[in-house]
Image (cartoon, rainbow, N blue to C red):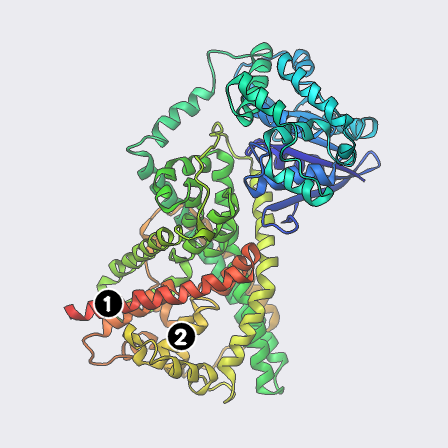
C-alpha cells in the first residue's frame, strides 16, 4: 500500500482534493493519543492500493500546538511514501514557508498548486518551469472544485513513490553563506560516531537545523530514544551564526525561510493590477470595520442560529415522534404480556435513550452544514480576528469565540469545535465556558416555568437567562485563567484571511455528514448507558411510581442542602435536576409525571390503525416536516431564537402541566423568584449526557469530572445569590 500525506496551511483545499481524488468520503477519527481530527481515504488506482492522509492544516512545524506536533510526528515517524504539499495558488509566497519546513524533513514531496482556476481568473502569470527549478520539486496545477489536474497529480505522485529514494536531502534554498555554514556542521555530524543511529532515523538537514535552533521537543525525543544530550552540541557554531547575523538562531532561520518564498515568487509570478482580490479587500473594509464589524457579525450569527434552529425543529419533532410514537408503539405491542419492568426497560430505557441521541441529528446536520458554508466562504477566519481583542481579556484568542457561539445552538458541537484552538489549555478553558451558553434544549424548561409564573413577561425573562449564561461564562473564564492548568500561552493571533469564495456544496455536504456520523458514533453508547441508569432510578423500588422512586428519595435528602436557592422547598424541583443531566428537555416530562397531571378523558373511541397506515402517516409527516424545515430556514425572525414554546406545545406533555407547575408554590409571593432561581440552576448545572460524552472524548474522564464539579458549585452559588438578594425586593 502506498501512503500519501497531504500537508499545507489551513484553508488550502486539502480535504477537497482528497475527496476529489478518492471519489469517496473521508473516514474521520482522532489521531492516537490526541484530540486532533484524523481524516483518511482508501482507494485503488491503476491496481495500486492507496491510503491518503489529510494532515492538520498548519503554518509551521514548531511543536507549539497539537496540530503542528501531529503533522511533524506523522511525517517523521510514520514516514509516508510521498508528501503532497498543497499550496494555495493565490498566496504562494506565504505557503512556501511551510514548503521549506517540509523539505527539511527529507521525505519525497510534490507540490499541488491548488485553486489554480482562481489564480488564472485573477490574471496572474506563473513561469512554471522556472518555479519548479527554484523550488526543487515537481509541481502540478490543480483545482479540486473543477476536477482539474487531479489525474496528473496522482500519476506523478505514484511515480515519485515508486522511483524516489525514501530519504531526500533537498537543497533548502538558503543563501550561499548560510548554506556553507550548514554544510560545515553536517560534515561534522557525519563524522561523529554517536550521531550514526540518529541519522538512520532522521534526515540530516532536520537534525542539523533542530540542534542549532535548540528545538526542545526534538532534543527531548533524542534524549529518550538514544540517551544522548545534544543540547550543547555545536554551541560555537550557533554563537558564531548569531553574532554574524546579529539575531537569535530561530529568527535567522525564520527570516531565511520567508526569504526563500519571497525570492521564488519575485522571479516566477507576475500579477495583474486588476485583481479579484480587490473584492475581498472591499468586503473586508465593511465586515472587519472597527465600528460596524462586530454588530454585523452578531447579526450574521443571529441569522445563522435562526436558520439552524428554525430549520431543524420540524425534523427534530418528526424524529422524536417516529422513535417514540411509531417504533415505541409497535415494540410496545410486541411486548404485551411480558413483565412491566421489561416493558419499561425497553420502551422508556432503550428506545427512549436511543431517541435521546438521534433526536439531535437534524440539529447537528443543520449546524454543521451552515458552519461548513461559513468556513468554506472564508468568513469564519475573520470571526477570530474580530473577537481577538475581547477574548484576550479572558486569556484566550479570537478563535475561542466560535465554540461559544455554537453553544447557543447545542453544547455538543461547541465542545468539538474547541479543536480549532492552538493550545490545550485554551481548549480546556473554552470547554468549561461553552456549556454555560443557553442551548435550545433548555427552552422547553423556560417555556414551562415562564408560562406558569411570568405571563406576558416571559420573553424578557428568557432573554435575561441567556445574558446570565454569558456573564457567568465570562466570570468563570477570567477566574480559571489564573490557574496553571488553564493558562494559555501568550501568543499573538496569527491567522491568514483567505479570499472570499463561493463554497463547494460537495465539500460542505461531505464535511456535514462526516461530522454528524462522528457525533452519533461517539455520543450513542455513552448516553444510552447513562439513560438506562436514570431509568432504573426513576422506576425502582416501587415499579414505576416516580414519587416513591430512588430519585424522589434522593431529592428529599438533597433538598435541605439546596434550601438557600429557594426552590428546594419542593422535592420535585430538586429531583428534576438529575434527569436534566440526561437532557434538559426531560425536566418538562418529569414534572408532568411527578405533579400527577391528569389526562382528559375522551368520549371518542381510540382510532385503531394498521402498521401500513402508520408507516404511510410517518412518511406524510416527514414530507410535511421537510417542507416546514425549508420554510423555517428562510424565516429570519431573530425573536424565534428566544421565543418560548406556546402553552399548547407545553401542554402536549400532559393536560394542565402549566397549571400544575404554577401550584408548586401556591399563594407564595416569592413563587416567581423561586421559579427564576430554578431556571438559573437548570441553565448553569451539569450539561446533558451527550455534552459530557463529548468532553470525555476530547479531554478525558478527569477533566469531565472537573467540569461536573464546577457546574454543580456555580449554579448553587448563582441561584442562592438570585434568591437571597431577590427576596429583599419582594
Inspect this view and state whether residue 173 appears: no
Which quarter of the rendering shows the N terminus? top right
Distance Cα–Cα, label 1 vs label 2: 20 Å
Inspect this view and state whether residue 40 appears: yes
Which badge, 1 or 2, is on the more N-terminal residue? 1
Mark drawn on residue 725: none
- Position of residue 203 in the picture relative to residue 717 (left or right): right
- Position of residue 553 in the picture relative to residue 64 (left or right): left
Find residue 158 and report its horizontal and vertical position in percent.
Answer: 79, 30
Image height of 328 relative to 370, above or below: below
Residue at numbered disc 2:
576
Find residue 632 and report its horizontal and vertical position in percent.
Answer: 41, 50
Secondary structure of the residue carrying tag 2 is: helix
For label 2, count other residues whose C-alpha is less than 10 Å away and answer few (under 14), some (14-19) or many (20+). Answer: many
| Quadrant of the rendered image containing residue 47 | top right
Q: Observer-nearest residue: 505 or 694?
A: 694
For label 1, count other residues whose C-alpha is less than 10 Å away and answer few (under 14), some (14-19) or many (20+). Answer: some
Q: Nearer the viewer, mark 1 or mark 2?
A: 2
Name the residue: 44% across, 57% down.
313
Q: Observer-nearest residue: 710 or 644?
A: 710
Find residue 489 and report its horizontal and vertical position in percent.
Answer: 46, 42
Name the residue: 82% across, 33% down.
46
Image height of 244 relative to 554, above or below: above
Name the residue: 57% across, 13% down.
263
Q: How many numbered circles are shown?
A: 2
Find residue 233 and report its horizontal and vertical position in percent.
Answer: 65, 31
Residue at numbered disc 1:
454
- Give the residue furthest to the bottom: 542
- Give the residue furthest to the left: 729
Secondary structure of the residue carrying tag 1 is: loop
Q: Observer-nearest residue: 473 or 447?
A: 473
Amino acid at each position: 500500500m502506498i501512503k500519501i500525506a497531504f500537508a499545507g496551511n489551513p484553508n488550502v483545499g486539502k480535504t477537497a482534493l482528497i475527496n476529489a481524488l478518492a471519489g469517496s468520503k473521508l473516514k474521520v477519527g482522532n489521531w492516537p493519543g490526541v484530540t486532533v481530527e484524523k481524516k483518511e481515504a482508501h482507494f485503488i488506482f491503476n491496481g495500486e492500493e492507496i491510503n491518503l492522509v489529510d494532515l492538520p492544516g498548519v503554518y509551521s512545524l514548531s511543536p507549539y500546538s497539537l496540530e503542528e506536533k501531529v503533522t511533524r510526528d506523522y511525517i517523521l515517524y510514520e514516514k509516508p511514501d510521498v508528501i503532497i504539499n498543497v499550496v494555495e495558488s493565490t498566496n504562494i509566497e506565504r505557503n512556501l514557508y511551510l514548503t521549506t519546513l517540509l523539505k527539511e524533513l527529507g521525505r519525497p514531496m510534490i507540490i499541488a498548486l491548488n485553486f489554480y482556476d482562481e489564480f488564472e481568473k485573477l490574471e496572474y502569470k506563473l513561469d512554471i518551469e522556472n518555479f519548479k527549478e527554484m523550488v526543487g520539486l515537481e509541481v502540478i496545477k490543480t483545482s479540486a472544485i473543477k476536477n482539474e489536474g487531479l489525474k496528473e497529480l496522482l500519476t506523478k505522485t505514484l511515480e515519485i513513490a515508486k522511483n524516489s529514494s525514501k530519504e531526500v536531502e533537498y537543497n533548502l534554498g538558503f543563501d550561499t553563506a548560510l548554506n556553507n555554514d550548514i554544510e560545515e556542521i553536517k560534515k561534522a555530524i557525519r563524522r561523529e560516531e554517536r550521531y550514526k543511529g540518529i541519522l538512520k532515523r532522521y534526515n540530516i538537514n532536520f537534525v542539523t537545523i533542530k540542534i542549532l535552533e535548540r528545538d526542545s521537543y526534538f532534543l527531548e525525543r533524542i534524549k529518550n530514544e538514544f540517551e544522548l544530550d545534544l543540547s550543547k552540541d555545536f554551541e560555537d557554531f550557533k554563537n558564531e551564526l548569531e553574532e554574524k547575523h546579529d539575531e537569535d538562531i530561530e529568527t535567522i532561520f525564520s527570516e531565511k525561510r520567508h526569504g526563500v518564498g519571497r525570492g521564488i515568487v519575485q522571479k516566477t509570478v507576475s500579477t495583474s493590477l486588476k485583481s479579484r482580490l480587490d473584492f475581498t479587500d472591499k468586503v473586508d473594509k465593511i465586515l472587519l470595520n472597527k465600528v460596524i464589524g462586530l454588530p454585523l457579525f452578531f447579526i450574521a450569527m443571529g441569522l445563522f442560529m435562526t436558520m439552524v434552529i428554525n430549520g431543524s425543529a420540524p425534523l427534530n419533532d418528526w424524529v422524536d415522534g417516529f422513535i417514540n410514537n411509531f417504533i415505541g408503539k409497535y415494540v410496545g405491542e410486541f411486548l404485551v404480556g411480558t413483565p412491566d419492568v421489561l416493558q419499561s426497560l425497553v420502551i422508556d430505557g432503550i428506545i427512549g435513550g436511543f431517541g435521546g441521541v438521534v433526536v439531535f441529528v437534524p440539529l447537528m446536520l443543520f449546524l454543521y452544514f451552515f458552519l461548513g458554508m461559513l468556513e468554506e466562504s472564508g468568513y469564519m477566519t475573520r470571526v477570530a480576528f474580530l473577537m481577538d481583542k475581547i477574548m484576550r481579556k479572558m486569556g484566550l484568542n479570537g478563535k475561542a469565540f466560535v465554540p461559544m457561539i455554537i453553544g447557543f445552538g447545542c453544547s455538543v458541537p461547541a465542545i468539538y469545535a474547541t479543536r480549532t484552538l492552538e493550545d490545550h489549555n485554551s481548549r480546556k478553558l473554552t470547554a468549561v465556558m461553552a456549556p454555560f451558553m443557553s442551548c435550545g434544549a433548555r427552552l422547553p424548561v423556560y417555556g414551562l416555568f415562564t408560562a406558569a409564573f411570568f405571563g406576558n413577561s416571559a420573553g424578557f425573562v428568557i432573554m435575561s437567562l441567556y445574558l446570565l449564561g454569558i456573564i457567568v461564562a465570562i466570570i468563570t473564564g477570567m477566574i480559571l485563567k489564573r490557574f496553571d492548568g488553564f493558562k494559555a500561552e501568550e501568543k499573538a493571533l496569527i491567522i491568514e484571511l483567505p479570499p472570499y469564495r463561493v463554497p463547494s456544496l460537495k465539500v460542505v455536504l461531505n464535511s456535514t455528514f462526516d461530522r454528524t456520523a462522528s457525533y452519533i458514533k461517539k455520543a450513542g453508547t455513552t448516553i444510552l448507558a447513562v439513560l438506562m441508569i436514570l431509568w432504573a432510578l426513576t422506576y425502582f423500588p416501587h415499579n414505576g411510581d416516580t414519587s416513591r422512586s430512588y430519585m424522589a428519595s434522593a431529592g428529599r435528602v438533597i433538598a435541605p442542602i439546596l434550601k438557600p436557592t429557594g426552590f428546594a422547598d419542593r422535592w420535585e424541583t430538586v429531583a428534576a435536576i438529575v434527569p436534566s443531566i440526561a437532557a434538559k428537555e426531560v425536566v418538562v416530562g418529569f414534572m408532568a409525571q411527578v405533579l400527577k397531571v391528569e389526562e382528559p378523558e375522551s368520549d371518542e373511541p381510540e382510532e385503531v390503525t394498521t402498521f401500513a397506515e402508520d408507516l404511510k402517516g410517518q412518511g406524510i409527516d416527514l414530507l410535511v416536516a421537510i417542507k416546514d424545515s425549508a420554510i423555517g430556514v428562510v424565516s429570519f425572525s431573530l425573536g424565534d431564537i428566544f421565543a418560548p414554546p406556546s402553552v399548547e406545545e407545553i401542554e402536549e406533555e400532559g393536560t394542565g402541566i402549566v397549571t400544575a407547575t404554577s401550584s408548586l408554590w401556591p399563594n407564595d409571593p416569592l413563587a416567581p423568584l423561586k421559579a427564576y432561581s430554578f431556571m438559573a440552576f437548570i441553565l448553569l448545572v451539569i450539561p446533558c449526557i451527550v455534552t459530557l460524552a463529548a468532553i470525555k472524548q476530547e479531554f478525558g474522564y478527569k477533566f469531565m469530572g472537573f467540569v461536573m464539579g464546577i457546574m454543580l458549585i456555580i449554579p448553587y452559588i448563582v441561584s442562592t445569590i438570585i434568591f437571597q438578594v431577590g427576596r429583599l425586593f419582594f
